[in-house]
Image (spheres, grey):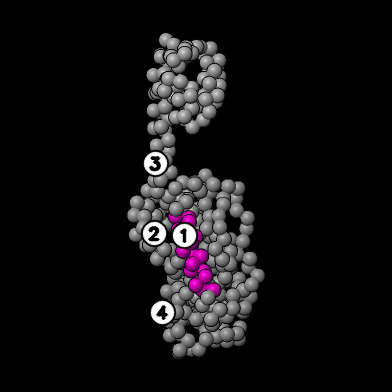
Amino acid sequence: MDWNDLRYLLAVADHGSTLAAGRALQVSQTTVARRIAALEESLGLLLFEKRQAGYTLTPAGEELVDRARNVEAATEGFAEASAALARDTSGVVRITTQEIFANTLLGPILRELHELHPDIVIEIDTRQELLDLGEGEADIGLRSTASEQPAGVVGRSICIDDWTLYCSRDYADRHGVPRTRDDLKKHAIIGGGGGKLWLHYEAWLRALGLEGQVAMHHATSTGLLSAIRSGFGIAVLPCIVADADPDLIQCVPPRDDHNRSLWLLTHERVRHTPRVRLVIDFLYERLMRHVRMLEEKRAVA
């Protein structure tokens, strides 16, 4: 049985003929007659008596029409409920990212998101360990990565994730801006950043012969930012963050051999959930606007 044929049953019952039913359904009279015949054949029942005045329901047809109306009402209710769910963007969206991105890049963007969509509740997780999007540990990830993503994880690239050494303008006024490896050996380096960041940062300092210049350690990436702003010394920061800060000065160009990019990621299991889709699209548009602003700024400089 084709459930769609119930529409033809109800139309003929309501309008009394295949011609009138066809006009109501915006199909040909032949199509209506064919669908009624197919329905009767599939059910093994005669639903209408074909008279000169039109189509008249048989006793079996009269009994089944009421049930067909229940099906129609249930179908309309299903469509309305699904449409409501498709429009509903309320609820919790969980974002995982590094602390420095959460506190600098995402802060202003999420404030604007809340002003426009107050029914969305954002939860941000800045733990060092990588959360599993496939297991539902987070809905969205803003991540720096050079590797292929696990199966089912999809996303959009934001920019190359360059990091390099920065100092504050206050520090530069007092000590100058180091531009070479030899210059850097005369300045205080702030180490740390936590987790894998410090692993790569320390290796870079060692390769530059600067491990002996570390005068302070911070456990987090925002700690590095805070120490730089205080004028204590020099530390590594993401260019997408630091180049937008007028109080920070880039000391040396970033490395060009890391192959890392900043990605906005989610899992295909939740990518079409209305609130997740809305947040992803909003973050992507605002982050790309930020990237374009930095590109224009660098072009002028």
Mark yes or no: residue 213 visible: no
Tag 2 residue: 113
Tag 3 or tag 1, which sits nearer the N-term?
3
Mark 4: which secondary structure? loop
Residue 231 in percent (x, y) is at: 43, 82
Mark 3 vs mark 4, CA separation in Å: 51 Å
Mark yes or no: residue 265 visible: yes
Image label count:
4
Disc 3 marks a residue whose amino acid type is Ala
Residues at circles 1 and 2 in contact by the CB criterion of under 8 Å: yes
Task: Point out which mark residue 283 bears.
Answer: 1
Tag 2 or tag 1, which sits nearer the N-term?
2
Tag 4 or tag 2, which sits nearer the N-term?
2
Mark 2 vs mark 4, CA separation in Å: 31 Å
Mark 1: which secondary structure? helix
Disc 2 marks a residue whose amino acid type is Leu
Q: Nearer the viewer, mark 4 or mark 1?
A: 1
Considering the whole magenta stretch, tell me its main secondary structure: helix
Q: Is residue 175 above or below residue 1?
A: below
Tag 1 or tag 4, which sits nearer the N-term?
4
Residue 254 in percent (x, y) is at: 59, 75
Task: Point out which mark residue 84 bears.
Answer: 3
Residue 301 in percent (x, y) is at: 54, 82
Q: Residue at x 56, y 79 (%)?
A: 299
Residue 238 in percent (x, y) is at: 52, 70
Q: Which residues are drawn in magenta? A: 279-295
Q: Is residue 247 above or below residue 106?
A: below
Tag 4 residue: 230
Disc 4 marks a residue whose amino acid type is Ser
Q: Residue at x 49, y 32 (%)?
A: 26
Q: Is residue 165 above or below residue 43?
A: below
Q: Dividing the image into 4 quarters, which one contains the N terminus?
A: top right
